[in-house]
Image (spheres, rainbow, N blue to C red):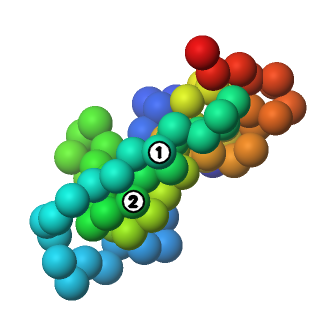
Amino acid sequence: MYSSSGEPPTGDRTDMLAVRNGPVEIAPQLDGPLAVYGNLEIISGTGRVVSRAEAVRLCRCGHSNTKPFCDGSHSRVSFRSV
């Protein structure tokens, strides 16, 4: 769970990526999250590494309990993308 600071917890994937640069693709999902692909390093506002991954789904409905990551809440709240 999150602390009152809004700081996301450190995830399971914080080991270094083999490659830390390259192209990034952002694919907005209809009425859902942003699917992001590439060599990604997710950093908190305080500079702590939250996750390193090659693909993530980022919340854009604002209701996820695992922010910044999508947990499927967009379906529950009937989020609609414009």
Q: Amino acid at mark 2?
A: Tyr
What residue do we see at 32% from left, 44% from top? 44
The part of the image, by quadrant, that contains residue 75 is top right
* Label 1: element kind: strand
Q: Amino acid at mark 1?
A: Ala
Checking the image for residue 71, the label placed there is: none
Mark-to-mark CA distance, 2 and 1:
8 Å
The part of the image, by quadrant, that contains residue 21 is bottom left
43 above or below 12?
Answer: above
Q: Which residue is situated farthest in the right direction here?
A: 76
29 above or below 5?
Answer: below
- Side (left or right) of 34 relative to 15: right
What residue do we see at 28% from left, 36% from top? 45
26 above or below 32?
Answer: below
Q: Which residue is situated farthest in the top direction here?
A: 82
How busy is the neighbourhood of tag 2: few (under 14 within 10 Å), some, or many (20 plus)? some
What residue do we see at 74% from left, 44% from top? 72
Looking at the image, can residue 18 be seen?
A: yes
Residue 17 location (% of width, % of height):
25, 78
- Side (left or right) of 29 relative to 16: right
The residue beneath circle 2 is 37
Residue 22 location (% of width, % of height):
16, 64
What residue do we see at 31% from left, 79% from top? 15
Residue 25 location (% of width, % of height):
34, 52
The residue beneath circle 1 is 27
2 above or below 80?
Answer: below
All told, the count of numbered labels is 2
Looking at the image, can residue 41 be seen?
A: no
Choose the circle earlier in sequence order: 2 or 1: 1
Are discs 2 and 1 less than 8 Å apart at CB? yes
